[in-house]
Image (cartoon, helix red, strand yellow):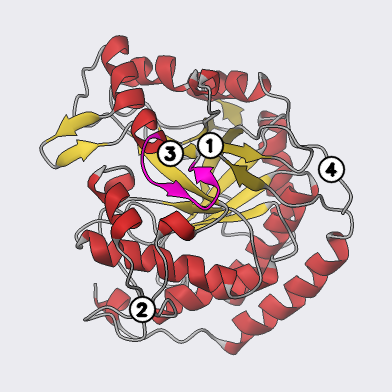
């Protein structure tokens, strides 16, 4: 925790790279599509169709270290070779080493990410960036908000780059978690970037946070989190636009659940010893944003709890009246959630690819 609590100053090269990468994206975006939008429970793709997330998670270090940041394009090609119709990749930017904090990248880290984003989004694959530095904890520093601001400014003209608030926040009062999400949203919007922002509740889906997000108005700094702005007040999620819920579905509360029990938990939630955990219907009936019903994406799921039964249910999420979609965990996570091994899809990866393949692929480009 010492590393997380000390003040982190973003190096000048990070800001410089942000400027140069933004210039690069300005050139490429003359051919990119108009933005994604949210409308009453649906995510609308640039071509006007319903966007259903069909993708995977990777760590920022999955294809790293590399001796050259140019290998980022090779990494994208490797993903597409194994998942040809993939339309979304969530980059879990995690503290894998001292230099891999979301808000404290090295120059090579940052160049690799910039090249990866460029290569993926030119293929019309959405890249979701989020702070994955902690799991089951809660961090909030000015460095974190600064990083979101830099990335948002860099990609404000690239509609295929989305953002998510801090991964699975926990160990903090709901008001602080809601404030952090508000500060993140404000930082992104302050750059003129109106891209999709995915919001996570406590632990990735506890229902008590849904009302907190709706009812907690005050933003700004939080005691013991100095300089934690910029959200110095303002409206709750009910006045936000282009936001979606990022639901994480691991049935750790009932690891022996049957298919029927998994399905019930997915749609209607489940009571746990830590409180009620939301289901898709709970989110849909929860607070509305400025765009109406807030859509849901299952940003993480895996077989490590309830195994094949989870898989049997989760890959049917596209059948809901409000399309959901999901991003499987993970290219190279711990067993059994391993999508790829020795450059080949596992059986789990094959099942995920079948779900991806059943979609229409990446959204068609629409000229601005």
- Residue 40 position within the rendered picture, expressed as x and y whole percent measured from the top left: 55, 39
Q: Nearer the viewer, residue 363 or 91?
A: 363
For the point 13% across and 42% down, which residue is it? 274
| Residue 276, numbered circle | none
> Magenta region: which residues?
285-294
- Residue 292 position within the rendered picture, expressed as x and y whole percent measured from the top left: 51, 44
Q: Is residue 1 above or below residue 314?
A: below
Q: Quadrant of the N terminus?
A: bottom left
Neighbor class of circle 3 (other Cα within 10 Å; few <14, some 14-19, many 20+) is: some
Q: How much space separates mark 2 and mark 1, taking CA atoms?
A: 29 Å
Residue 108 placement, left or right of 226: right
Q: Which residue is mark 4?
A: 365
Give the mark toward the camera: 3 or 4: 4
Give the mark toward the camera: 3 or 2: 2
Badge 4 or badge 2: first in the primary sequence = 2
For the point 43% across and 71% down, which residue is it? 183
| Residue 41, numbered circle | 1
Secondary structure beneath label 1: loop
Badge 3 or badge 4: first in the primary sequence = 3
Q: From where the camera sits, is residue 132 visible?
A: no
Q: How much space separates mark 3 and mark 4, taking CA atoms?
A: 27 Å
Residue 105 placement, left or right of 124: left
Question: Magenta-highlighted stretch: main secondary structure?
Answer: loop
């Amino acid at each position: 925790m010492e590393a997380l609590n000390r003040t982190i100053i973003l190096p000048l090269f990070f800001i410089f790279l942000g400027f140069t990468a933004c210039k690069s994206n300005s050139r490429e975006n003359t051919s990119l599509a108009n933005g994604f939008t949210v409308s009453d429970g649906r995510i609308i793709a640039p071509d006007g169709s319903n966007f259903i997330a069909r993708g995977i998670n990777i760590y920022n270090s999955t294809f790293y270290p590399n001796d050259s940041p140019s290998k980022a394009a090779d990494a994208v090609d490797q993903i597409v070779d194994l998942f040809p119709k993939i339309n979304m990749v969530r980059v879990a930017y995690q503290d894998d080493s001292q230099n891999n904090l979301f808000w404290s990248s090295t120059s090579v880290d940052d160049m690799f990410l910039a090249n990866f984003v460029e290569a993926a989004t030119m293929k019309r694959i959405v890249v979701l960036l989020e702070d994955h530095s902690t799991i089951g904890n809660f961090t909030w520093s000015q460095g974190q908000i600064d990083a979101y601001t830099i990335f948002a400014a860099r990609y404000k003209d690239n509609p295929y780059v989305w953002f998510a608030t801090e991964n699975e926040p926990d160990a903090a009062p709901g008001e602080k978690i809601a404030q952090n999400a508000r500060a993140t949203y404000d930082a992104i919007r302050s750059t003129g970037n109106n891209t999709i922002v995915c919001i996570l509740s406590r632990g990735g889906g506890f229902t008590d946070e849904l009302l907190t997000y709706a009812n907690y108005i005050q933003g700004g700094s939080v005691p013991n989190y100095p300089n934690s702005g910029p959200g110095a007040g303002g409206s709750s999620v009910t006045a936000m636009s282009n936001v979606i819920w990022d639901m994480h579905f691991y049935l750790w509360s009932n690891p022996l659940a049957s298919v029927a029990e998994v399905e019930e938990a997915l749609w209607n939630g489940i009571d746990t010893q830590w409180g009620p955990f939301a289901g898709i219907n709970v989110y849909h009936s929860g607070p509305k944003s400025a765009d109406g019903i807030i859509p849901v994406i299952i940003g993480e799921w895996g077989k490590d709890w309830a195994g094949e039964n989870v898989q049997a249910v989760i890959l049917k999420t596209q059948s809901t009246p409000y399309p959901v979609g999901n991003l499987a965990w993970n290219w190279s996570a711990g067993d059994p959630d391993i999508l790829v091994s020795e450059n080949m899809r596992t059986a789990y990866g094959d099942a995920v690819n079948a779900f991806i393949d059943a979609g229409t692929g990446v959204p068609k480009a629409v000229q601005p």
